[in-house]
Image (spheres, rainbow, N blue to C red):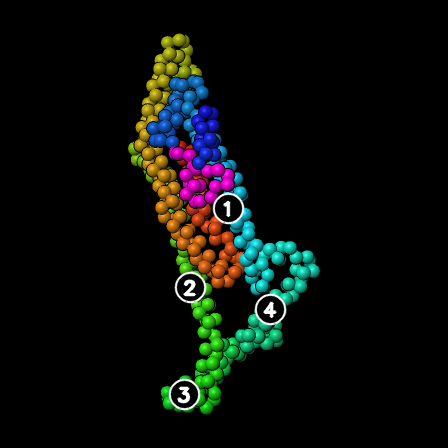
Amino acid sequence: MKKIIITLFALAMMLPARAQMTPEAVMDMTPDLPSTAALLNYWKNSNDPFDNEYPNSDLLNEFMEAWNAANDQIQDMQEKTLAPGMKKNAMAGLVAGTNKTAGEVANMSEAEAKALAMSTMKGRISSMSSMGLSQADFAKLQRSDLSDEEAKAMASKVMAKQTGGLTAKDIEAMSNMTDEQRAAFMQESGLGASMTAKMNADKGKRASSQKQYQLVTELTALGQKEHSLQQKAIGMIESARKEGVALFDRKYRKADEQYREEIHRAVVEQEDAIGEAAYKAALARLNAAQSAWFNNMSQFYAEYIPLYRDAVAGAMDCCRAQLLPVKRQHKEVMEQLYALTRSAEYALSESIPFEASYMYFELSEKITEFELTL
């Protein structure tokens, strides 16, 4: 209990409730992992067949009490320092397809919300119009039985609108022309002038769309990298467990089975013993078998615990050294997308780096699961 009080005091002094919350601060609040020696002693104290008293080590409970205390403070800090700013940004973001912020939409009456929905639908129709499609075309697109001919006709309309008049028929007509004939066709039909005018008019819009596409593509790549690193961190611990089972199978299982059989036989002999001498002889064999089993398992855990602890520490380090920098890149790209689009879906960039620190913190709890089911 004294250790827990000291831990809480240290956390309170290190990070006041109003202090700036950073991913590193969250990571630094994580209790230190117990040493390999402490974990081995804990296992021995808990499994010694000749120790009839309650284990004198409460190592894992002490760790979890400190962990829970840190978790409570992290949640409190998040609510007081991180959440308000994130909520403000989210409420200021535009709802997709509207010029209204999330905050404005949240405060609308039912009638205003319905009006916005109707306006949004009209906006979609207007957007279709800007692509060269009519309201009738919009209605056709809602159908599931749109024919190939109708689809081609709509595609040609969209092409004409986006290029300044060029249609699929024009492309087909020019496909067998020479360069000189195509140039003459473009000039005589007026397509050359209209397409040039359209390109000049859309120059700024194209640049913005290209930048947004580039950022979204970058965001997707970062997401894939983050997933890979998260799987890597989790995989370290899973691999350590598999290595532990393999180690046990290779070096300790045969002896373990032998000692368990000897324990079972000695227990039966003790139960069936007639006379004090026979009972004592059976008890001696039972004690010897239990001692041999305990020594065998102690040797196994002396070899396995360092491997497992290194895996947990390595997984946590992966979050700090590798995942956190990628999450920060993710945050920067989201900020750029938010500045470009003002969309609410990019408004919570501030929270992204903390995903690495929360994973770091949660992985530390895995140290309490060092014992294997063998």
Helix, strand, or loop for circle 3? helix
What is the distance, in whole Å, between disc 3 and disc 1 at their CAs? Answer: 61 Å
Helix, strand, or loop for circle 4? helix
Q: Nearer the viewer, mark 4 or mark 1?
A: 1
Q: Which residues are magenta?
A: 15-33
**x, y percent for residue 182:** 40, 87
The residue to which callout 2 is attached is 214
Q: Residues within 10 Å of mark 3 (few under 14, many from 20)?
A: some
The amino acid type found where label 1 is placed reads: Leu
The residue to which callout 3 is attached is 182
The amino acid type found where label 4 is placed reads: Gly
Please state which of residues 57 and 82 is positioned toward the viewer in this rendering. Answer: 82
Q: Nearer the viewer, mark 1 or mark 2?
A: 1
Please state which of residues 295 and 177 is positioned toward the viewer in this rendering. Answer: 177
Q: Residues within 10 Å of mark 2 (few under 14, many from 20)?
A: few
**x, y percent for residue 352:** 46, 50
Q: Residue at position x 46%, y 91% from top? A: 188
Q: Nearer the viewer, mark 2 or mark 3?
A: 2
The residue to which callout 4 is attached is 123
Asked whether residue 32 is drawn in magenta, I would say yes
